[in-house]
Amino acid sequence: MKSHHQIEVGINSITILPPAGEHSDTAVLCFAPTHKKDFVDFYYEFHDKLDEYRTGIGCYYSKAFGNPIFHSSIGVFNVDCLKSIMNMIFSSYAFGLAKINALELYTYPMQLIERYELTK
């Protein structure tokens, strides 16, 4: 993968990757970065390499399924707790501009596989 620079994106919404399979009682809460062209280009290039490196990681992560979800995971939560978590996020002033300085790859549930730093 070629070298990439840090990318400024808007963090203007949140998304939930829904419960599925053996994890039917939890969901992944994520920020949804804006789809700025240089971020989209980087994301797809990264996922090309990811699909070569790992298979079977699911339709939310793999470009091979044709619909990867642009997201920055906040955490894995019990579905019943999401309402209070959402209230906390909405009152935290977390939305606005952000700088992407690394991309991290996690297993489900949330164990770091590898971190890819972006240059300044």
Image (spheres, grey):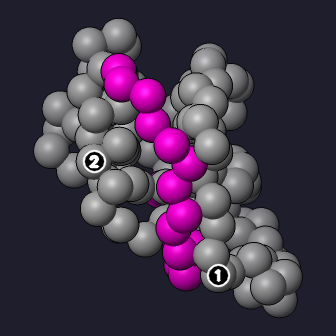
Is residue 87 found left or right of 115 in the rendered image?
A: right
Is residue 103 found left or right of 20 in the rendered image?
A: right
Q: What amino acid type should be assigned to the residue bearing mark 1?
A: Gly
- Quadrant of the rendered structure where residue 66 is? top left
The answer to whether the residue labelled 2 contacts the one labelled 1, judged by CB atoms less than 8 Å apart, is: no
Mark earlier in primary sequence (2, 1): 2
Q: Circle 2 is placed at which residue position?
A: 41
Q: Circle 1 is placed at which residue position?
A: 96
Distance from disc 2 to disc 1, alpha carbons, whole Å, reads: 21 Å
- Quadrant of the rendered structure where residue 102 is? top right
Residue 3: give x, y in percent of width and height: 44, 28
Residue 16: give x, y in percent of width and height: 52, 63
| Secondary structure type for disc 1 | strand
Q: Residue at x 45, y 37 (%)?
A: 4
Residue 52 visible, this angle: yes
Q: What amino acid type should be assigned to the residue bearing mark 2?
A: Asp
Taken as a whole, is the magenta stretch helix, strand or loop?
Answer: strand
Look at the picture and state if 29 lies above or below 109.
below
Q: Residue at x 35, y 67 (%)?
A: 35
Look at the picture and state if 81 lies above or below 120.
below
